[in-house]
Image: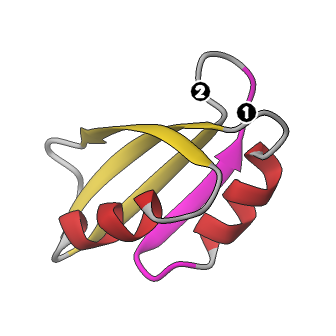
Amino acid sequence: MAEAFMLIQTEVGRAEVVAKQVSALAGVLSSEYVTGPYDVIVRVGGAQVQDVVAAVQQVEGITRTLTCPITGAAD
């Protein structure tokens, strides 16, 4: 199973809503809204991580994402 972190920027005031919507998607392992340069940090995993990433990017209110694959993730 491959995993990645997604760093997400949202429209102003949408971080909490986006984090909750993303957490309901298949393949999302965790989703938290935070402070700093990014508004939401998501951990995704599965055989087809790129499909999960694509689904996350479709959530309304997201303005930008950065996907960071996890190398050497424990199985």
Specify the segment rendered in magenta. 25-35
Q: Is residue 41 visible?
A: yes
Would you name the residue on which mark 1 appears? 34
Residue 26 higher or lower than 22, as above or below: below
Classify residue 50 by image quadrant.
Answer: bottom left
The C terminus, quarter of image: bottom left
Q: Nearer the viewer, mark 1 or mark 2?
A: 2
Q: Residues within 10 Å of mark 2 (few under 14, many from 20)?
A: some
The N terminus, quarter of image: bottom left
- Res 38 label: 2
Pointer 1 with pointer 2, Cβ within 8 A: yes
Classify residue 65 by image quadrant.
Answer: top left
**Residue 37, image x and y in percent?**
60, 16
Q: Nearer the viewer, residue 65 or 26?
A: 65
Residue type at the position of mark 1: Val
Residue 43 higher or lower than 63, as above or below: below
Q: Looking at the image, which residue is at 68% across and 48% down?
A: 32
